[in-house]
Amino acid sequence: MEKGLLEALSIKQDPSSMKFEIDKQTLKDLNIFGASPNDKSLFSLFNATFCAGGKKKLTEFFSNPSDDITFLTERKETIAFLQKHFSEGIDLDKNSLDFAEYYYRHANFLAEVPSLYAVIMKFLNRLNNYKKFHLIDKGVLSSVKLIKSLHSFAQLLREKCELEECPQLLNERVTELLKRLDQKEYKDAIHPKRLNVFEIIQMDYVFRKTHRADLSFFLEFIYELDAYITVANTARQHGFSYPEILPQAENILQAEGLFHPMVAGAISSDVSIDAEKKLLFITGPNMAGKSTFLKALGLSAYLAHIGFPVPAKKMRISALSGISTTINLADDLALGYSHFYAEVKRIKDVAEMLESHRNMLVIFDELFRGTNVKDAYDGTLAIASAFSAVKSSFFVVSSHIVEVAEELEKKAGIQFGFFEVNAPAGDPTYTYRMKEGISNIRLGMHIINKEGLIDFINKLSK
């Protein structure tokens, strides 16, 4: 094993605050966004927004994980409150929203004085069915519909908050909404009445000139609420729960009933990592469920750090400063890297991340699969041992090399899990559930014999 790599794992950590670490390899491994818009990704699981602005807001949430406990807690509490009380969201007309957005983006005026503007526009409308008046007329009426819907929602929310404490984030947003709606300029918009031409021109002047920032706020409020309601409905549909985010000093990562949300009929497992044993070493034969579990753990930690519900019955996690996974690492032929060298380089890159990020979740699936068995054994043993000595991050490493696990049992700071396989005389059956301990099941030759591979090749020699 390269000496420089092992030295790199002797981490000297910088206590300064840094942006949450998440790299392209991790985003790809966890399939956060997918390789193309049509991929079945984690984002696509949540992406059922009412409008394009809501989708953009959801993308923004997904793209900005954080370790700010206050921020994450406020967001998850907001989503949980909406899940409980507002599964349908705001009663909005999609066509009105679309036109209000279009109207907002086209702020052109013929005059600065509303009364003169009204006279001119009314005259032109009668003579020529003037297109600009059509935009103003429909734009104002569409915006008025949105304001009425927002006002009704805010009033209903206030009623709910009298029965149950409203989350701070949502309370702040609604307080600001009501403050803006309480202005005298919106009296005609909130209270139902038929607007005449003069009133429409006046409202146009308010919406797109004097109070343009208000209309922007109203639209942004709708987008944000749309994203939150979508997340809440996804949580309800798939049985997600809301994680407890703890201070980094707690040094804990616990999940009960953890499952992969994009695997049909996924089997759940429990996991608990703490300050005493911060490296979890997982064994088990191929197809037993190791990789699926690792992905489920990684994406659950990711969701927790964007303030979202997670695919688990219960989760407690101290705030992380980053997540790094190595599950589907490819050769880099363009740079002339073999798979083994790509693995070595990846481990060194992770070590460099750890030098500047104190609290990370690091996941490796099958270390050193790109080399011979002896080097894989030595390398896995050396790297796992080095990681186990890093005090402030969590590590999860899987391997089918059982002998490494047996040697690691002699070291402190490591716990062991395996994926159970029932393999009596007949075909193996997989439980896809992790248990404590080390697997001693080897199924390679069983599968080779089952497929009749040796017999088939022997026929070729006759």
Image (cartoon, rainbow, N blue to C red):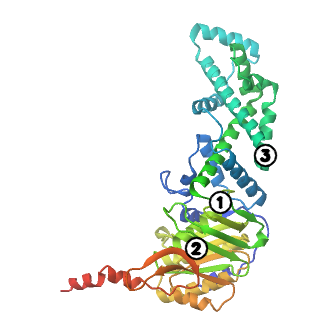
Q: Distance between the residues labelled 3 and 2?
A: 53 Å
Answer with the quarter of the image where residue 92 lies. Answer: top right
Q: Distance between the residues labelled 1 and 3?
A: 23 Å
Q: In what element is the residue under mark 2? A: helix
Q: Where is residue 406 in the image (x, y as percent from the top left)?
A: 57, 90
Residue 177 in percent (x, y) is at 77, 37
Left or right of residue 191, residue 127 in this image: left
Q: Which of marks 1 and 2 is in front?
A: 1
Of badges 1 and 3, the one in the foreground is 3
Residue carrying label 2: 346
What number is the disc on residue 163? 3
The answer to whether one can see residue 267 in this image is: yes
Q: Which residue lies furthest to the front in this view?
A: 163
Q: Is residue 249 left or right of residue 415?
A: right
Crowd rating for badge 3 (residues with CA inside 10 Å; few <14, some 14–19, many 20+): few
Q: Name the residue that disc number 1 marks.
A: 241
Q: What residue type is labelled 3?
A: Leu
Viewer-closest of 28 and 289? 289
Residue beneath the point at 75% across and 54% down: 74
Amino acid carrying label 1: it is Ser
Looking at the rendered structure, the kind of residue marked 2 is Arg
